[in-house]
Image (tube, rainbow, N blue to C red):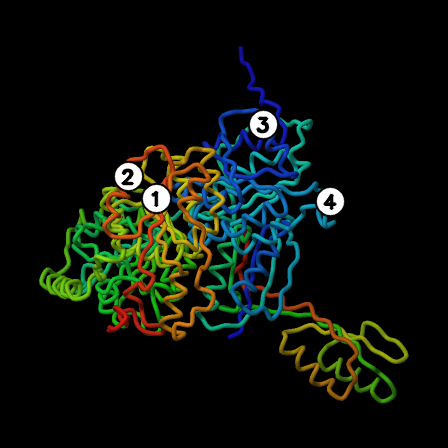
Amino acid sequence: MNQKHQPELLSGGAMLIRALRDEGVEYVYGYPGGAVLHIYDALFQQSEVKHVLVRHEQAATHMADAYARASGRAGVVLVTSGPGATNAVTGIATAYMDSIPMVVICGQVMSHLIGDDAFQETDMLGISRPIVKHNMSVRRPEDIPAIIKKAFYIAQSGRPGPVVVDIPKDMTMPNQKFPYEYPTEVKLRSYNPNSKGHPGQIKRALATLLAAKRPVLYSGGGVILGKASEELTALAKRLNVPVTNTLMGLGAYPATDSQFIGMLGMHGTYEANQAMHHADVIFAVGARFDDRVTNATKKFCPNATIIHIDIDPASISKTISAHIPIVGLVKPVLQEMLNLLDKQGGAIDAAALGQWWQQINQWRDVHGARYEERRDVLKPQAVIEAVWRHTKGDAYVTSDVGQHQMFAAQYYKFDKPNRWINSGGLGTMGFGLPAAMGVKLHYPDAEVVCVTGEGSIQMNIQELSTCKQYGLGVKIINLNNGYLGMVKQWQDMNYDSRYSSSYMDSLPDFVKLAEAYGHVGIRVTHPDELDAALERAFAIKDKLVFLDIHVDPKEHVYPMQVPGGAMNEMFLSKTERT
Amino acid sequence: MRHIIAVLLENESGALARVVGLFAQRGYNIDSLTVAQTEDPTLSRLTLVTRGDDQVIEQITKQLHKLIEVVKVSDISESAHIERELMMVKVKALGEQREEVKRNADIFRGQIIDVSPTTYTIQIVGTSEKLEAFLEALSGTQILETVRTGVSGISRGEKSLTA
């Protein structure tokens, strides 16, 4: 008997949830409202896709984003039309700037009301257009499964990014049902994102690298997104080349390895920026020569031949011209280089490389990562080092934006990819706490630390309530210096210390605030208290602990590149510069 | 440098807005833009005239390619091509001016497509340069209105832009 498969009849709302399930989605982060009530009702009637109710839609986007950063799978957001959608905009832009896969489902007013300035109507396709990889609107309910499939495919393939799906309320009517079938694949004539790289270019790149005397491997977020950390490490080891990571690339190469020369760029290490400037071959892997990396492009690495692997051709030769461009996914390209090395052998001239390492180690000795150690006042760098020790270097660390972010990037030595989660491109304050929540929800047994400051944390402080509801035991390290530290640093350096609006008067008592939300609050004001406080905090497994750590308000982040200068022109402390 | 960029894109609502938005967001110039459905109703073809050095034009074509609904992009001004633009000019045409305008239109192989006791409307087709030259030739005449389609372009020979 040949029994023909009969597809189930589902409403638009139910099809949406079923499609998410079939896509393997476990959690959706969101906030209900008029235009998405049918969808929320469909969510309520099943148990496979779980919903996390945030306190502000921005937090939903950061949760989804951080889940994606930690897992490599697209995070999913569900918000209502109008203010629900516009509140999600900052989070969408954050994901866009860092190429993070995300699917954002926005409610919309009934189709026949679109364009009438209806209640809670906003043109979300128009608003989100410049900050998405793609966006789509549902015109017929029966298209929902195909549109969701397409959204995930676009978000997760090639150079990943956020995709917005706008769904008018009448597309999700509970009484209108359609046969549901989830497509197995998507094909778009206008979008073929996967490329293994041109074999000839890969050969040329390897030959150039092997002929180098002063090579630097400069790798970025693309290595993490492209899950190519292993290949990158193997290649670097094989060739014994120094490796520097961008802010987005930290963890792609183990930071405790001797070949790692630290982060590069505006607040990069002395040795990384010097090595870049003096390099004869720069091998850029999944990095985009961002202005926070290059400093003045005209003075950038004057003697270097540049090899650049990127999946996005538009990233190649955008700000810095590449001599050997390779358009392709980082992983297969690096693998091909390793294969070639296996087949043909080859190494960089040992004498030249030895000399280069000698030079780099000398830079490292002279001005490597360092800060003034004090017994009387807590240095933010010392706090990060202590957190690193207490978490055995194995935590997921999220951060907000500012000095604390740079200290965390400089002093927490990430040995694994996907562990350092921060808003690099957009620089979104308020990212850290929801990001930590998104990671903790999916990795409940992992240690998840949010490094923040008293400015940033207050941008999404309401999420302490969400943490309570879902029992998210994240550890908040609030580096409290009473100032918007990075703004203050620039005002110290460029505005004769006129602290225009960088002083945060009337801060709340963070310990009491944490307690008010049902969490544990601990205040640390002296270096002698730090270790005991961290020990206590990390011993508490099932509760959120808010550590309000009062740090030196005078501290600046160094090194700092001199504006308009070359890579290697840096302020090294308040009194020294190169 | 002036470049003529031809783009084939999915004939879907919002696709054009994406192209135009890209130019605004990234600060690229648009001198002219023309778009219409092709012989395949699922595709639109757009011709865009822009200016920039080689690096800017390279970025423009790459960024256009990145748009999901863009199927093909070609800088047709890179090789042999034909460009045409259509312009309609309404001028005051009284007394001796009527003859003068008519003569100019003939010289430029334009056609007078509308006549009133006081005006002529001339249609003229050619490169943008020719259209400019015609307007210059009319400098002694009072121009009431001009309307131009923007440039359309196509490659010479067998080279063609298809999906």
User: Outermost residue toward the left?
Assistant: A351
Residue A462 pos. (x, y %): 49, 44
Which amino acid, by three-letter code, is at mark 1?
Ile
Q: Nearer the viewer, residue A444 or A550?
A: A550
Q: Which residue is mark 1?
A: A522
Q: Which residue is mark 3?
A: A180
**SS assignment at label 4:** helix
**SS assignment at label 2:** helix
Q: Nearer the viewer, residue A50 or A469?
A: A469
- Lower position in the chain sequence, tag 1 or tag 2: 1
Residue in the image at 83% along x and 77% along y: B120
- Relative height, residue A37 to residue A132 (above, below): above
- Lower position in the chain sequence, tag 2 or tag 4: 4
Pointers 4 and 1 within a single chain: yes
Cβ–Cβ under 8 Å for marks 1 and 2: yes
Which amino acid, by three-letter code, is at mark 2?
Arg
Cβ–Cβ under 8 Å for marks 2 and 4: no
Q: Which residue is mark 4?
A: A113
Q: Which residue is mark 2?
A: A536
Residue in the image at 73% along x and 71% along y: B147
The disc numbered 2 marks a residue on which chain?
Answer: A
**SS assignment at label 1:** strand
The disc numbered 1 marks a residue on which chain?
Answer: A
* Disc number lying in front (3 or 1): 1
Which amino acid, by three-letter code, is at mark 3?
Tyr
- Lower position in the chain sequence, tag 4 or tag 1: 4
Pointers 3 and 4 within a single chain: yes
